[in-house]
Image: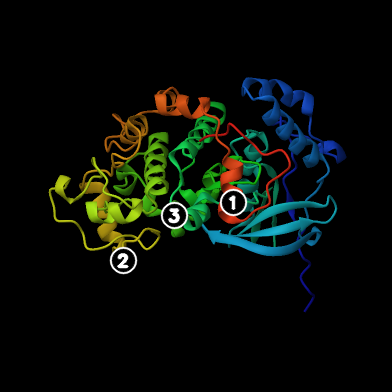
Amino acid sequence: MQKRRKPEPIQLNPIPDGNTINGTGATETNLEALQKKLEELELDEQQRKRLEAFLTQKQKVGELKDDDFEKICELGAGNGGVVFKVSHRPSGLIMARKLIHLEIKPAIRNQIIRELQVLHECNSPYIVGFYGAFYSDGEISICMEHMDGGSLDQSLKKAGKIPEQILGKVIKGLSYLREKHKIMHRDVKPSNILVNSRGEIKLCDFGVSGQLIDSMANSFVGTRSYMSPERLQGTHYSVQSDIWSMGLSLVEMAIGRFPIPPPDSKELEQIFGFPVEGEAASSESSPKPRPPGRPGSSYGPDSRPPMAIFELLDYIVNEPPPKLPGIFSSDFQDFVNKCLIKNPAERADLKQLMVHPFIKQSEAEEVDFAGWLCSTIGLSQPVTPTHGTAM
């Protein structure tokens, strides 16, 4: 029997302006065409230089091929794929390569690759950079900028809690996706918020490909415990669902554990080391007895057995949403409350949140996030650390 010839990888060339270009020049990034778009983003000088440096590096990448990558280590797994830190030999660049195994027809995989094209246009200081995507040996490869600080999920495990002053920049990534590309993220959670030793905070793993989402439907895309009530109930959902997920993530990172079911006063005292006043959506505010558990993903001192997933989802749909305890600023508490309104029509939208006093205060404050991150997870800090990048 004749040996079956290995199919050529399907290539997604970097074409940032969205035009279809064939031939050897297809991998060249047109920085002049991007200049206007970069100006619209209202970047500071440091952000602009970094983004232009990334796009210049991207020109060196050329056609992505499976054989050109050398695996360094596994970075993580989830949402239907495994992510590796890799070296791209032709360019010498270190990348993060996500492999998604899919048994699908050629027409479907071609459509997925085409839909991922929009990632070339997602150039923002708040979005993880994209080098390209291709299909080979039953796997979609998505090649991205490597973020040496990992995810905020990992930072939370090391730090216990993340300071309020650092919790606000993720909304800029969501706002950029919505305003510039009409994209919903669909899977906002701490593990999809990446950070690096320069103090940058960026979103990854957002749902640009409807076909990829459909192809991965069996894995129930989006971690269920972060899903909004309307999404869990199977009704129509919009970008307002991302707002809920963001609010839930902010509470988790602020108190150090997944906030459903909410901590009682005893646990809050354990978390913060002293009695905490104010609402925390404790058992007193719930019409039902507090459920006997919590999700297994929490990091706090709660030692109760994990809450069963269906019990957790029922709680999200039917019980009051979590609140921040009174130890946090009134602006931060109000911001979270506006994110975690159960009715999506009453929930704050991105435009309202972008002008909220909590965000304005975060933008005005000088916070050495790079220094905090590097000391927390043991990274070497760059010579020119990033200041003024409060979330």
In space, the residues marked 2 and 1 are separated at their CA atoms by 28 Å
* Image position of 23 (left or right of 232): right
Amino acid carrying label 1: it is: Ser
* Image position of 9 (left or right of 99): right
Mark 3 lies on residue:
160
Task: Describe the element under mark 1 as helix, strand or loop.
Answer: helix
Mark 2 lies on residue:
303
Amino acid carrying label 2: it is: Ser
In space, the residues marked 3 and 1 are separated at their CA atoms by 14 Å
Label of residue 375 in the image: 1
Q: Are marks 2 and 1 in contact (CB under 8 Å)?
A: no
Q: Residue at x 29, y 47 (%)?
A: 233
User: Horizontal and vertical percent for residue 45?
Assistant: 70, 25
For marks 2 and 1, give the one nearer the viewer.
1
220 vs 365: above or below: below
- Mark 2 Cα-neighbour bin, 10 Å: few <14, some 14–19, many ≥20: few
